[in-house]
Image (cartoon, rainbow, N blue to C red):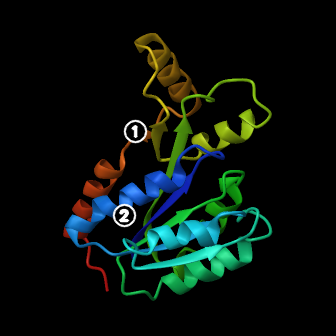
Amino acid sequence: RKPLVVITGFLGAGKTTFLRGLLEATAPYQIKADVILNDYENAYLDSETLRATAASVEPIAASCACCEGMDFLIDLSVSAASSRNELLFIELNGTADPIPLLESFTLLESKLLRAPRWHVCILDARHLGKNTSHRRLRELQLETASHFALSHSETLTSLERSTLYERIRAINPLASETTPELLAAALASLSNRMTWS
């Protein structure tokens, strides 16, 4: 069994930037990762920017992996179970509902051979908690996450930051904050305790 990291976050939150940083942060540990990238407009373009650091990159140019791209995503994920590489990273489209995918992964656990399964939600500090048309989807992505990472938070005041963390904890009190470096270190720690074939 090998770890799986699913990355979600609404459009423009910084998912690909986080993924790129994660791939760079795992490189010193000599951990190789396969990547599945779901992006309707930029899947092929973004996948080319990741090829230097990922062991393999499979783009899915579907509007959303939770519906029309689900079968293709599941097929790629099952195929990745036989990969020699230690990790699988999946970046979902910004409008993806993570629940159908996470449910499918649970049902197909014996074929996917992925454990632990971590879900990292990239939170755009500019929009979290605001009354936007996709507020519920943003919250749903956070509700199902095991980890979260803040993006675009550089200009927050201490009060704004405190309020933001209160919102995050109200939605998901169990998710751990992470960065590409922290996550890479945790994955490397797992490699010392697991035998990957």
Q: Is residue 119 above or below residue 67?
A: above
> In the visual, does 111 lie left or right of 60?
left
Whether residue 77 is visible here, answered yes or no, is yes
Residue farthest top in this picture: 159
Image quadrant where one finds the C terminus: bottom left
- Percent from the top left, x then y, of residue 14? 53, 47
> In the visual, does 87 lie left or right of 62?
left
Which residue appears at 48% of the width and 68% of the height?
A: 49
Q: Amino acid at mark 1?
A: Glu
Whether residue 193 is visible here, answered yes or no, is no
- Percent from the top left, x then y, of residue 13? 57, 43
Quarter where residue 65 is shown: bottom right
Query: What residue sits right under mark 1 in the picture?
Result: 177
In this orientation, which residue lies closer to the viewer: 44 or 150? 44
Image quadrant where one finds the N terminus: bottom left
> Cα distance, mark 2 to mark 1?
18 Å
Which residue appears at 66% of the width and 39% of the height?
A: 138
Which residue appears at 46% of the width and 29% of the height?
A: 153
Q: Is residue 10 above or below residue 157?
A: below
Q: Earlier in the sequence, mark 2 or mark 1?
A: 2
> In the visual, does 155 lie left or right of 125?
left
Q: Is residue 110 above or below residue 164?
A: below
Quarter where residue 67 is shown: bottom right
Q: Secondary structure at mark 1?
A: strand
- Percent from the top left, x then y, of residue 50? 45, 69
Q: Is residue 130 above or below residue 44?
A: above
Q: Amino acid at mark 2?
A: Leu
For mark 1, does the 10 Å Cα neighbourhood hold few (<14), some (14 to 19), or many (20 or more) residues?
some
Which dot marks residue 23? 2
